[in-house]
Amino acid sequence: MKTSDIKKLSVTQLEKELTNFKKEQFNLRFQKVNSQVQNTSRFRVVKRSIAKILTFLNQKKRDIWWQKEFWLGKL
């Protein structure tokens, strides 16, 4: 998944994409054990996509928290 696509998604959409990629990673691991993997480069793509999504998810959650604290006058 491209970074520009990830930036456009909301928090709920990012969480949904994260679960989809984690399921795919789980299935790829089972395919690897059973020697049924068709595209070995997919491991790398899925792993990096999970990392990108987690990065942007944490960033968006931190921004939401920061705005909430700022407007409540705690900072």
Image: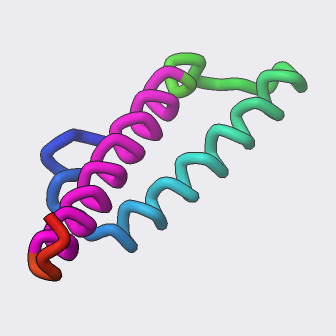
Question: Quick check: 61 above or below 68?
Answer: above
Placement of 55 over or under 29, stated as above or below: below
In the rendered view, does 27 fall on the left or right side of 59?
Answer: right
Q: Quadrant of the C terminus?
A: bottom left
- Check the image and name the residue furthest to the right: 34
In the displayed structure, 69 sits above or below 24; it is: below
- The quarter of the rendered structure image containing the N terminus is top left
Image point 40% across, 37% down: which residue? 49
Q: Which residues are magenta?
A: 44-70
x, y percentage for residue 6? Answer: 24, 51
Q: Is residue 1 left or right of residue 72?
A: right
User: Which residue of the protein is positioned furthest toward the front in this rendering?
Assistant: 74
Establish if 66 lies above or below 37.
Answer: below
- How many marks overall? 0
In this picture the colour scheme is rainbow
Residue 43 on image: x %, y %: 56, 24
Horizontal side, residue 54 vs residue 32: left or right:
left
Q: Nearer the viewer, residue 21 or 65?
A: 65
Residue 21 rendering spot, x and y as whole percentages: 54, 48
Which is nearer the eye, 62 or 55? 62
Residue 19 falls left or right of residue 45: right
Q: Residue at x 49, y 21 (%)?
A: 44
Q: Main secondary structure of the magenta part?
A: helix
Residue drawn at 55 percent across, 56 percent down: 20
The reply to whether the magenta stretch includes residue 43 is: no
Residue 8 figure quarter:
bottom left
| Residue at x-position 42% and y-position 28% | 48
* Identity of the residue furthest to the bottom in this view: 72
Q: Nearer the viewer, residue 27 or 57?
A: 57
